[in-house]
Amino acid sequence: MSETTADSGNTIGIISGNGIYPETFVKAARKNAPGCRLVVAAFHDETREDLADQVDAIEWVRVGQLNKIIKFFKKQGVTRAIMVGQIAPNNLFNLRPDMRILLMLARVKKRNAETLFGAVGEELAKDGIELINATTYLDDLLPEVGHVCGPKLKKRQQEDAEYGFEIAKESSRLDVGQSVVVRHGTVLAVEAFEGTDECIKRGGKLGRGKSCTLAKVSKPNQDFRFDVPCLGTRTVETCAGAGVKVIACEAKRTLILGKEDVVKMCDEKGISIVAL
């Protein structure tokens, strides 16, 4: 493999976290942009190892090695990059920061997802690498308004979905969390740093496993270059175990990953997904 590509504008750099999101993007890019080279900066203990077989080049790094990622991308001729997949919270607290990350952190006053990833985007831009939307090539996985799958909602469920959606929007505006669990007009759990799955479990426990509703939304002015709300089979499985019967997501602003498997699982477990 040559040190740089002949056509650098035809190479996308993928900053890959865990789950099926990176693989989903790779498949969509192969379909929608044939001939495009895909190179991956993969994280140890996060990115699936088999992703290496699906892309043109891969470099394994540890969380916090920003300079290594940028050097790899520049070597590969990357001018556009995309962030796909999450990083486990415990890994964010076990950073092995390089000097570039340390200097970046020194400039950031608020250390939340928006400011930190925004700062990473600025660092990439310094080296001529544009961070593109994490929904690129994935429009067909963003649901329209209305019933998505599973049983049709009853009146009480629809009311809880709309109420939960309203509360989640306010919670996300305050940068607390983007998911809430409600039952019969009562908020049972609000997501914070622990993540959506733990919020679902806590809400289900407080609701005694009886027909709760999960609402998951985007932040106001959400930067879709990173931190895109996602639903997948793991979310549905967690909801099933907690007694959550309805998932209300935000239309055209939520990715449903592994959609065929999600629809099948919702039908099997009697869970409804609605986009508001």
Image (cartoon, grey):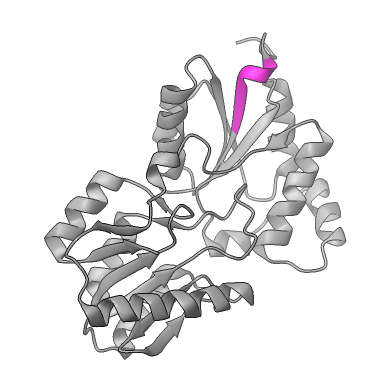
Q: Residue 61 location in percent, x, y? A: 62, 40
Q: Point out the stretch of residues depicted in magenta.
A: 8-13
Relative height, residue 241 to residue 262 (above, below): below
Q: Residue 66 location in percent, x, y? A: 72, 43
Q: Give the residue at x 53% y 73%.
A: 169
The residue sitting at the left extreme is 268
In the rendered image, which quarter contains the N terminus?
Answer: top right
Relative height, residue 236 to residue 47 (above, below): below
Horizontal relation, residue 153 to residue 201: left or right? left
Q: Is residue 12 magenta?
A: yes
Relative height, residue 188 to residue 114 (above, below): below
In the rendered image, which quarter contains the C terminus?
Answer: bottom left
Q: Residue 272 location in percent, x, y? A: 24, 65
Quarter where residue 112 is shown: bottom right
Quarter where residue 175 is shown: bottom right
Q: Residue 55 location in percent, x, y? A: 48, 24
